[in-house]
Image: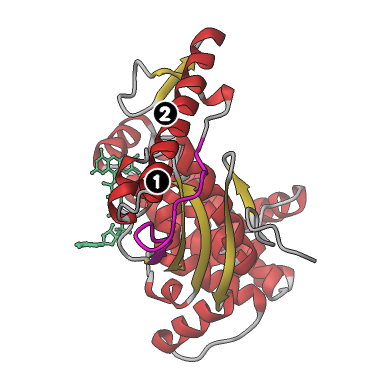
Amino acid sequence: MIEDINFPSGSIKCLDKGFVRLVDSMGGDNAIVQAARVSYGKGTTKKSQDRGLIRYLMRHRHSTPFEMVEFKFHAKMPIFVARQWVRHRTANINEYSLRYSEARDDFYFPEFENIKFQSSINKQGRGKQVSKKIREKVINYFKEISNRSFEIYDELNNDGVARELARAILPVNLYTEWYWKNDLHNLLHFIGLRSDSHAQYEIQVYSDAMSLSVKNVAPFAWEAYEDYRISGMYFSKLDQDIFKKNLPNRILNDIIEDINYQLIATMNEIKPRKEDDLFNLYVEQGGEDIKEDFIIKWNSGKINKSNIRELKELKQKINKMKK
Ligand SMILES: Cc1cc2nc3c(=O)[nH]c(=O)nc-3n(C[C@H](O)[C@H](O)[C@H](O)COP(=O)(O)OP(=O)(O)OC[C@H]3O[C@@H](n4cnc5c(N)ncnc54)[C@H](O)[C@@H]3O)c2cc1C
């Protein structure tokens, strides 16, 4: 089979003519836990424990084990996207050289639905849809400038003008290509910034495509990243003061009680206990219900299970909020 040079095998199409493809990767979830256990001492190697350790590392920003996983991408993107991308300084890059090779007639033309007005609330973003007339005008100008500049570039090349100079006539919607290698920690940092809704649409497309590779190569790390970075929330001191003021201790105590039950259910799932032992465990965790009430609640329905460390940390945080 002859490979399409515009979309090499394994590429994810991005924008109208671009792509990103994972060329190579080193390590995965295993490499993260292997490295972490060097610092924490040898541990168990069950999959569920690997997942718990990765979540712990992500939660506590113990980031160096995530640097043990490497990704090498081949990407083709417009130059104005590459300019934003290159700001991420921890990557290794090798780019297609327009000093050495001739430019190709590959320009980015935005899709109709992505041609929008300047946002009125965000100086760095797009707002509402423009009219059909403006959309057509935008596309026509993109095409006019791209075609004309390429004609001139071609002419200068044929005249023997140095490629390194002739290229300066080309606009930033010209596509370029590079190999880009980075480790998982810094790739997640990139994705956090560039898949965010505040990032420019065109780079979001590439960032989202790369995140699929992370999900395949290191699924536990991706899951932890989604839970703690994407869906996680950070509360400033001001936010916490509002909670302290508005959440009375009785509500916080109720939440802590729920957590105690979840803790016991989780511990019991890992190592099943007799009913008497369960109640003792509950008391050890700070539970305040009497045994009769404990039995009623325990038997009354499904108690959510979670992660023991996470539940204990949540309990500590809620305790801190008490007046
Ligand atoms: C929505 C958005 C809007 C932006 N707007 C602008 C803009 O208007 N103008 C503009 O110039 N840029 C802009 N940027 C780019 C931005 O300022 C950063 O340069 C870019 O996001 C790379 O982030 P970084 O430095 O954290 O990443 P990386 O370079 O990948 O670095 C990762 C981390 O490594 C550390 N690090 C790396 N190198 C150094 C170093 N030399 N010294 C100290 N620590 C280092 C830092 O902790 C850094 O966070 C924007 C970015 C976004 C996402």
Q: Are marks 2 and 1 in contact (CB under 8 Å)?
A: no
Q: Earlier in the sequence, mark 2 or mark 1?
A: 1
Query: Vertically, is 313 above or below 242?
Result: below
Q: Nearer the viewer, mark 2 or mark 1?
A: 2
Residue type at numbered disc 1: Ile
The residue segment tinted magenta is 93-108
Label 2 beta carbon less than 8 Å to ligand 1: no
Q: Position of residue 109 (x, y in %)?
A: 52, 32
The main secondary structure of the magenta stretch is: loop
Per the image, the residue denoted by label 1 is 79
Query: Along the line of sight, which residue is nearer the eye, 215 or 131?
Result: 131
Give the side of residue 323 with respect to residue 201, left or right: left
Q: Residues within 10 Å of mark 1 (few under 14, many from 20)?
A: some
Residue drawn 30% across the image and 55% down it? 162
Query: Along the line of sight, which residue is nearer the eye, 223 or 19?
Result: 19
Residue drawn 42% across the image and 28% down it? 145
Residue 145 marker: 2
The N terminus appears in which quarter of the rendering? bottom right
Query: Vertically, is 82 above or below 28?
Result: above
Q: Position of residue 293 (x, y in %)?
A: 66, 50
Q: How many numbered marks have been drawn onto this rendered protein structure?
A: 2
Q: Is residue 288 visible?
A: no
> Residue reaching furthest bottom?
42
Secondary structure of the residue carrying tag 1 is: helix
> Does the stretch in magenta take in 106?
yes
Give the side of residue 120 with respect to residue 285, left or right: left
Residue type at numbered disc 2: Ile
